[in-house]
Amino acid sequence: MKREKLKNLIDIKDLSVKEIDDLIKVANDIITHKDKYSKKCEGKILATLFFEPSTRTRLSFESAMLRLGGRVLGFSDANCSSTTKGETLGDTIETVSGYADIIAMRHPKEGAPAVASKRASIPIINAGDGGHNHPTQTLTDLLTISREKGRLDNLTIGLCGDLKFGRTIHSIIGAMSRYKNIKFILISPEELKLPDYTITEVLEKNNIEYIETNDLEKYMSELDILYMTRVQKERFFNEADYLRLKDYYILNKKKLEKAKKDLCIMHPLPRVSEISTDVDDDPRAKYFEQAHNGVYIRMALILKLLEVK
């Protein structure tokens, strides 16, 4: 049966492995031939609807559209939108659909972008919904891994920090579980372990090897990728719990002594204290390259959803 054309990107699972690989291919071509893409979206408008604050993701989307020759409108805080007057999300989306050609939307409520897509007459990109999904961050991660390691299979990946609320963690597990010979080392305190449903529905369902541990250094020598995350204050109901856990893991140079020489250290940013600044000049630290890669993969995605050749 022929696969239906991609209209929105709400969940990383909306993309087939081939579509992910094709987006990475286009992103790499953009990196090599930037001028070739500088007018691809002339006359097109991206609306950035950020009901939750963001710096990197919002500016990355704006940079992507501007680099394609398009324009941008939108807001960066829910307080700047008519939802503060009582307007429903659906009405906001239906209205903005008449102002723009494509929407990038971040929302604190899980599932909000999926709801919005049912009211939109233009493509919707989920730029993060609560602790649920962040598919364009995952595409950024996959592009980074591909560029640094030359492959997306046969990898041992350490995921460290907040595995319970971290939407980037949930998305990257879902994506990488579709590639061959992937093993996850899940490093977290007991209170921030990966949810049971992700273990059952993704890892065990796909026969993915995994180890759960609270020891950052124990498996360091085995890792090809170390993906650090911050403990997110905004996901906690109890500040005391946040303060107790926020500095549970801090990666520094000493902890990297047993790591592979070609380890790839990643972080979706913003960083708080979980990676010491003494790691920044280590050639294995790739989190700033990772942030820059986000622009190019979002350029590729915008072109795909707008059906620009």
Image (tube, rainbow, N blue to C red):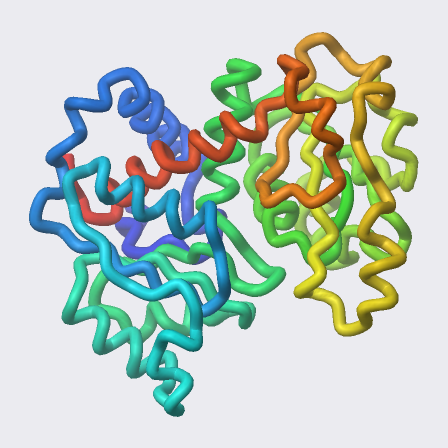
Residue 240 appears in the rendering: yes
* Furthest-front residue in this view: 277
Instruction: Tell me where residue 36 sits by quadrant.
Output: top left
Q: Nearer the viewer, residue 29 or 237?
A: 237
Which residue appears at 22% of the width and 62% of the height? 122
Left or right of 276 in this view: 142: left
Can you say which quadrant of the picture contains the C terminus? top left
Which residue appears at 8% of the width and 49% of the height? 43
- Where does the image place residue 67, in percent across and percent down from the top left? 23, 36
Left or right of 164 in this view: 49: left
* Furthest-left residue in this view: 43
Which residue appears at 39% of the width and 32% of the height? 18
Q: Nearer the viewer, residue 25 or 290?
A: 290
Is residue 206 depicted above or below 75 in this figure? Answer: above
- Where does the image place residue 109, in percent across and percent down from the top left? 54, 72
Which residue appears at 62% of the width and 36% of the height? 267
- Where does the image place residue 75, in percent across and percent down from the top left? 34, 65
* Furthest-top residue in this view: 261
Is residue 145 depicted above or below 48 in this figure? Answer: above
Left or right of 116 in this view: 306: left
- Where does the image place residue 70, in percent across and percent down from the top left? 16, 46
Instruction: Tell me where residue 294 sits by quadrant.
Output: top left
How many numbered discs, if any? 0
Is residue 300 depicted above or below 278 in this figure? Answer: below
Q: Nearer the viewer, residue 245 or 164?
A: 245
